[in-house]
Image (cartoon, coloured by chain):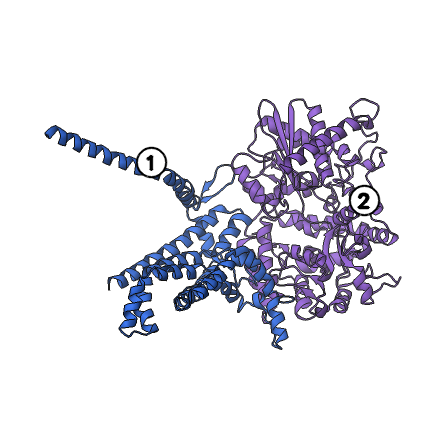
Chain colours: A purple, B blue
Amino acid sequence: MTRKLFKSVLVALSLVSLVCSVPAFGQEGEELKKPTEERPILVDPEYRVLCWHMGVKLHSYFGDFGVARNLRDWIDAEIYSSWSAPAYQIASVYLASLFEHRNPKVKVVTYEYAGETAGGEWPKVLMSRLAAGEGPSAYDPSIFGGVATAINKGLCGDITEYVKDWDQREYLDMKFWAPAWKDGRCYAIPGQGERHLLSFFRKDWFEEAGIFTEEGIAGPPVDWTFDDLVNIGQKLTDPKKGRWAFGLPVNRMLVEWLQNFGGFIVKPDPTGKYTFRSGLDLSTTKEFLKFYRDLNLKYKIVLTGTEESTLTAAYDFWGERTAMHTFEGTRHALEWGRMDRHMFGDKPWLDTVGIIPFPTGPTGLQLGTPDRWATWITINPVISKERKDATWKLIDFVLVGDGKKILAQDMAYILNDLPTNDIAPNPYHPRYLDDPNFTSRSWKETIPGERYRVIFDYVEALPVNPIPDFFAMPIMETAALQEKHRILLSTIVTDPDADLDAEIDKVADMINKTVLNYKIEGQTWDNVKEWATSLKEFYNENFPEHAKVFNEIYETSFAVWPE
Amino acid sequence: MALTLRKKKRFQEKEVKFKKLTIWLFCIPGAIVTLIFGWYPMIWALVIAFQKFMIIGPSKWIGLGNFSFILQDPMLPIVIKNTFYYALLSIGLTFIVPILVAILLMEMSKKTIRIMMWLWFIPLSGMASIVVLKWMYNVDYGLLNGILVSLGLPESGWLNDPRIAMLCLVLPGVIMFAPGLIYIAAIQAIPQELYENAHLEGADVWQQIWHISLPRLRPVISMMLILAVISNLQIFSQPYIMTGGGPGTATTVFVMEIYSQAFNRYAFGRASALAIILFSIIITLVIIQRKIVKENLDE
């Protein structure tokens, strides 16, 4: 009953907002003004590292919103959303209404999926619906253990015909797009959520422990190291008070930290028999794993254990057990800023929580860490041709068409990553922010204070490490890989008697035998070399201070360029 | 007269037919449910165990490919070992202890029995108890380590210690496993006169237990043992919620591996093959058990 009432209110609000907003779209009637500027080519196809920045925050639309249609006498679309924020709901209803208005044969129906989408039950729900010949018309297939796995399991529709003549195609680098192609057919388009990952900390606890930067601000310095992290952690940890430095998850490898150590979770197989081998036995990765273990067994500054996950680590922070939360996206900072969310008592969250980039690793690397969980968009393979056509039209409408403008205008909640896209442009998103019609606030405006602007500028200036892209090759079954990492991590952080090297070898062997036991067709060592060379050139040109370190890593870890 | 008899016979035949029809009609809904939710998935699982199963689109027959993969997977011996370890610990503790407690409880006053049954019933809300237990076992801020520290004793790793993690999972089952109540019900069904006669003939409490309670409980014990073997070999929720299978692989059990293959790797063929292996293990054990129990009953 409540849900029905809520939905009715949403629909009513959306209709009102639709009516009210028509004049706002300019003087040319209901048609929106087209961008006056020519869309620049924003991606250098030579360098994969630039492509990393490319995707717009499509996850907001298609990870959390799946779009579904049912063919009746007209075409229906359903928009799923796990977000219950009314503005979000209104935005989706509004978007659907305008799309319907433009496409009289299409009926768009929106409703909320009451559950967690990124993890939890959503993949199972979606899979069951697809297997039953139903399900949304478009969705993010990467939730099925990666896009390549989803394609292999038949969970992605063939969209080759649509992308063939798509005007965005020229902006998509195949090195980035490759995982979505199989046997010359395309099954998905990238929907990379671009955002930086950061650490969050309790300013009040830092102040209490007397930890200040040189400028006298409570918190760690922006260019802090992992040694600083340990020292600070020791000052902050006080089990008697029920305080620890941070929660250390074992359910997934902190790849964002690993990359600052110069480590890798996979490495290309030089023999060419397989595509990858486990990277756990690389010296840089081992060094990171030893550090990871010491955080608990030697320094005793973290909350961890077999049940500690990224989620419980967050609960530890918000539950006032830990002083820091090791990683969270800028999106959170932005949303909290927008919501003026009150946390830790009656104070606005920014009074208590500080933001800081990840520490510098022993290699000297302190890299910008975009959220590595790439998202993709595919079309439901079991729907009819008509529905596929309409779905593609809607995808285009949302990604590059006027739908995007609508979302950006009043419902800025969805475009929470616009500012990062502004820094790192993408082909789906021409610089709408320059358009006076677009009033979406940037994250710097949303989160007040000079201190934050300094930190954000600092984070944005950090070079972005392309390592999580796995050498331009798709990793199949990423969930299975994570599961094996959990075995290793939960052992080494809890069992002081465990032999680190032996455990690493055991799990690496398990991974090689049962997870990375495949070879991607057409992948050769030359591809890897070509990719690494492009990368080398990119770093030499753009981040010379890091180029040397990278070259050393590639040479020592993989002997990419043997004498 | 003959006509009446014939009529009567025909009526009786009709009545029998009607009864048979009624029986069949009553069976149909149950049979349909069993076929759809019992037999269909089982047969389907058997089929896809030999396929590279596609969720959408045609699956491919791969013969014994899934079984071959599983047999080479280092996880298989680990999960078999862990599952049997769990089952042995669990049956050892949750099977024997409740029988003894139930028998001894019957020697107490009715009021005490009632209170004890309440105490036994309340924690049966499994999931809620598991969540609380997870907190109790927490190494850093859990109740159990808090008690140990307050007593001046060294802290324990509980679920984080691979040597005792499995035991920590089994212990709550001693309380939460329902057989205790079933045994109490079964003991209450034993005619009181038997105990009174035994008492008059000079049998003490232990003799009464040994010669009356235990033999009378044998059919229940036999059935409960079969159920215990089946359920313990299929344990999932406790390790899944409390340890996620860790630390390392210390508490990763068979069904968790099936779940992982199915829902983490979307390898339904392999998951089905694993399920068939588990099914074969369980059915073999049950057959052996039935044989042994049958022999005992014949004695």
At mark 2, the secondary structure is: helix
Q: Quadrant of residue A366?
A: bottom right
Q: Which residue matches tag 2?
A: A423
Position above or below: A274 against A437: below
Question: How many residues crowd around disc 1 within 10 Å: few (fewer than 14), some, or many (20 or more)?
Answer: few
Label placed on residue A120: none
Spatial CA span between label 2 and label 1: 71 Å
Residue A291 rendering spot, x and y as whole percentages: 69, 66
Query: Is residue A531 at least partly visible in the picture?
Result: yes
Label placed on residue B25: 1
Residue type pointed to by label 2: Ile
Q: Determine if marks 2 and 1 fall on one subunit.
A: no
Position above or below: A215 against A62: below
Residue positioned 64% across, 34% down in the render: A4
Q: Is residue A415 left or right of residue A157?
A: right
- Between A247 and A250, the residue placed more toward the observer is A247
Position above or below: B97 against A263: below
Q: Quadrant of the N terminus of chain B?
A: top left
Position above or below: B195 against A354: below
- Nearer the observer: mark 2 or 1; the answer is 1
- Between B195 and A346, the residue placed more toward the observer is B195
Q: Chain of mark 1?
A: B
Q: Chain of mark 2?
A: A
At mark 1, the secondary structure is: helix
Q: How many marks?
A: 2
- Between A540 and A73, the residue placed more toward the observer is A73
Residue positioned 76% across, 60% down in the render: A359
Q: Is residue B57 left or right of residue A363?
A: left
Residue type pointed to by label 1: Leu
